[in-house]
Structures are given as C-alpha cells and as structure tokens.
Image (cartoon, rainbow, N blue to C red):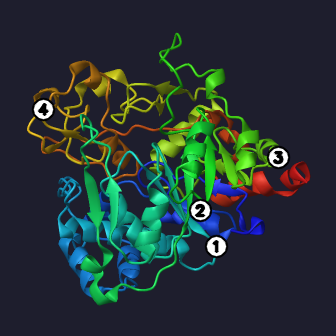
Amino acid sequence: MATSSYPQIIQGGMGVGVSSWELAGAVSSAGQLGVVSGTALEVVYARRLEMGDPDGSIRRAFDQFPLRAMADRVFARYYVAGGKPRDSAFRPVPMYTVKPAVALQELSVLATFAEIWLAKEGHNGPVGINYLYKIQLPLLASMYGAILAGVDYVIVGAGNPAQIPNVLTKLARNEEATLDLSVQYAGAEDRFSARFDPRALMGDAAPSLRRPAMLAIVASVDLAKGLTQGGGEAPDGFIIEGATAGGHNAPPRGPLQLDSAGQPIYGVRDEVDLSEFRKMGLPFWLAGSYGGPEQLRRALRAGAAGVQVGTAFAFCRESGLAADLKATVLRQVLAHRARVRTDPRASPSGFPFKVMDIPGTLSDESIYQSRPRVCDLGYLRAPYKTSQGALGYRCPAEPDGVYARKDGRPQNACGRKCLCNALLSNIGLGQRRGNGYDEPPLVTAGDDVVNLAAFLPIHDLSYSAVDVLETLLGERAQALVA
C-alpha cells in the first residue's frame, strides 16, 4: 500500500449491523474507508429475507454472485414474500460448530458477499470488514464471501489474529484454509481446527480473486511485535485502540482492579508507546476518543496514517442502529445526561464492554433480571474440551443449569448478558418469543458519545456520515493538520 493510498479516516466496524452497507458506502463514496461489521451476518440476512427483502437490495446483490444456483438456494431457504407476520418469531439459523453444515457455509458466504457488494455499489472507494477474532467459527466462510465481493481491508480485533494474514492469502487463491481454534481445557498436544475449502463449495465457479489488506486491532506494543516477528505473514497495518473506544475493550494489563463505579482501572502499563510502532514501519491508525479534528491532528503529528472513528458514525442517519435508539441517545447528549460505563461482566467473551445507560434496555437491572436466559444464536459460545475428549460449546450467558452441566463455573455466569440477541434488537431485528416477549436491546458507545452535539445541525436531531467527515476533514480540520 502506497502512503498516498492510506485513508485518514477509518469508520469503525460496530456491533451487529450498525456498521451497515449503507453507512460504509456513504463513507467510502466520500473517499475514506467505510467498514461493515462482519458479526452475525448470517442471522442479519436470514431475518431480512424473512421480512421480505423490502427494498430488494439482497436480491440485487445475490444476482451478482458468481454461482447463481447457490444464491438461489440461500434466497429460497429464507425469503418470505411480503414478509413474515410482525408478531411471529424469526426462524432459527443453525449455530456454527467446528464442522458446519454446507447450507450454513453458503449462507455465510452469500450474506458477506452481499454486504460488501452493496457497500461498494456505485463508487470506487475502498470498503473494509471488521471481525471479532473471539468469534472464530464463522470466520473462514465469511472472509471468503468478503473476498469474492472485492473487499479491500479485513480488520480483526478482540484477540490475537496471527493466523489471519495467511488465511486471507489462501482464500484469495481459492485454496483450503484452516484456523486453529482457541479451546478451553485443551492440552499442548491437542489441535482443534476449522477448515474451509472454497473449491468444494464453488467448484469451477471459483473466480480469480484479489487478497485484501489486513489490519490488526491491538492495544499493546507486545501484541503488535508478536504479529510482525512471529515468523508468519504480518498484518499490513495496525489500529491502536484505547480503552475509551466503544464495544469490546482489551482488559487492563495485570491484575484486574475496579474503581468505585465497578469499572476496570487502566494505568500506565496500558499506555502505548507510539515510537515503537513508528519503528515497525507499518501504517497505524489511532482509535478511542479520536472523533474530532484536533484529535486527528494529534494522531497525524504522532506519525499515524489517521484515526478510526466509531461512535460519531454509530448515531448518524446511515447507521443501522434503530432510529428510536439514536434519538434517545442524542436527546441524552443534548441534555448532558449521556452516560457510558465499562462493564467488566456484561460480555460473555470475557472482554470489558462499554454499555450506555438507557431505560428499557439490558443496561436496566430490572430488565436484565426479568429476561429469560436463552442461548439460541451462539456466536459468543466458547469451544471447550469435554472430559471425554470431544469438543463442546458453552456460553456464560446461557441458562444457568445448561452452563453448569457443561462444567461452567456459576461465578463466571453472573452478570453476563446475551449480546447476540441484544445487538440484533439494536438494529430492529430482535427476536419475538412465543410468549410475546421481545428481546431488549443493549446500546454500546465510546466515551466520545458526550461530544455528538458537535455534529448536529441547529434545530435538528439527526446528522449524516458526510457531516462527520466534513467536521473531521473540513477547512478548519485541514488547517489544523497542515
């Protein structure tokens, strides 16, 4: 990548469907790096098809897929003409295992292909996709779908993505790729791997492909050095994300200590020495409270290629977040009542997770306590080695008795929230249970949420992705970074 080709602004890959193709397309068509979220796209697309694909965008994207028979199968499997009844439940999508069914792999490939294709439609700007490495099982099929659609950047965080550069190289060659899995209780002699063979799925329809660049989200110099000096393919760059960013945060280094509000305490050991990154010779972007022109100027002067901005885009018109949640948060901001806290227990992943306090969502303790514990999506299930040596799957947010039967410790389940169902509710795709219970949302944002008023026009409660870019890169910003 030539220096001149680096975007100064990377739009963050947020939540499930918040970083939608509409948002990524708006950012990319304006010349910066738009990013879609790669998390749970299988369920997002299955549910949108059940709703009847009202704007026809899924059918339009599927029509561009190189293997028409596969696209038609996936469409027919989930599409409901006119949409399902509003008070009925969405049909289940199978959970991923180490050996997923072919039909599930097809759904992953098609959903990701469509999301990238739609984000790239009508312009020549770069488009990226963001993944949580913690969610390993769908990665191979999903990344192949993204490569098929011509994705330009693959961005991976929430773990050590050392295997991903080589995986991308193999998938771009239509070669079988393997991914060694993180398995609890596995011994040094154990190896559990996921496999994906593009040609087994695509046959002779597998086209020539271009390998995308890979950016690793890191929170320490040690991890970055390990990725560049480990002997395998290195990332093409880094996003250095601080603890004020939204969504999942890296845990503090050293023993976990909490402040008076129950939040993890980050200290000197968690500060990143940017001079070490400059020595590595790879481009890097700074993330976490970099949503203003002054912050962009500071990043550029520190040697960064630019910044990643999430929260400012999460609440703009083009994002996938439900309109009522956007309005609620923006009203809180204008009234100086917006509050974000870092919850060390909320996420089943074990990573600290930023939570906004909003009535009627899972941040409300009464809502959390009244929600029946259920795990029917399974993206944050962790593989573990059973006493019989087999591979099992468990989630600390699943029903207590189920988790206990899988040798899960009760203290590890305390306070865990079902992010899978909540994040789908955030984008209007929440499940309705048989008893009329609707899954509640749970909104995440970075500490920068309190500054969103800077993007709001006078007498308006909404703003666009272009408004964010113009604030960051307008004449005033250009003078600051010159």
Of discs 2 and 4, which sits in the foreground?
4
C-alpha separation, residue under disc 2 versus residue under disc 4: 40 Å
Q: Nearer the viewer, residue 179 or 51?
A: 179
Q: Which residue is mark 1?
A: 125
C-alpha separation, residue under disc 1 versus residue under disc 2: 8 Å
Would you say the residues marked 2 and 4 are in contact, meaning their CB atoms lie under 8 Å apart? no
Q: Which residue is mark 2?
A: 34
> The residue under label 2 is which amino acid type?
Gly
Image quarter hosting the C terminus: bottom right
Left or right, 264 with reference to 2: left
> The residue under label 4 is which amino acid type?
Val
Q: Is residue 305 above or below residue 270?
A: below
Would you say the residues marked 1 and 2 are in contact, meaning their CB atoms lie under 8 Å apart? yes
> The residue under label 3 is which amino acid type?
Arg
C-alpha separation, residue under disc 4 versus residue under disc 1: 47 Å
* Dot 4 alpha-carbon crowd within 10 angstroms: few under 14, some 14 to 19, many 20 or more: some
C-alpha separation, residue under disc 3 versus residue under disc 1: 23 Å
Mark earlier in primary sequence (3, 1): 1
Would you say the residues marked 4 and 1 are in contact, meaning their CB atoms lie under 8 Å apart? no
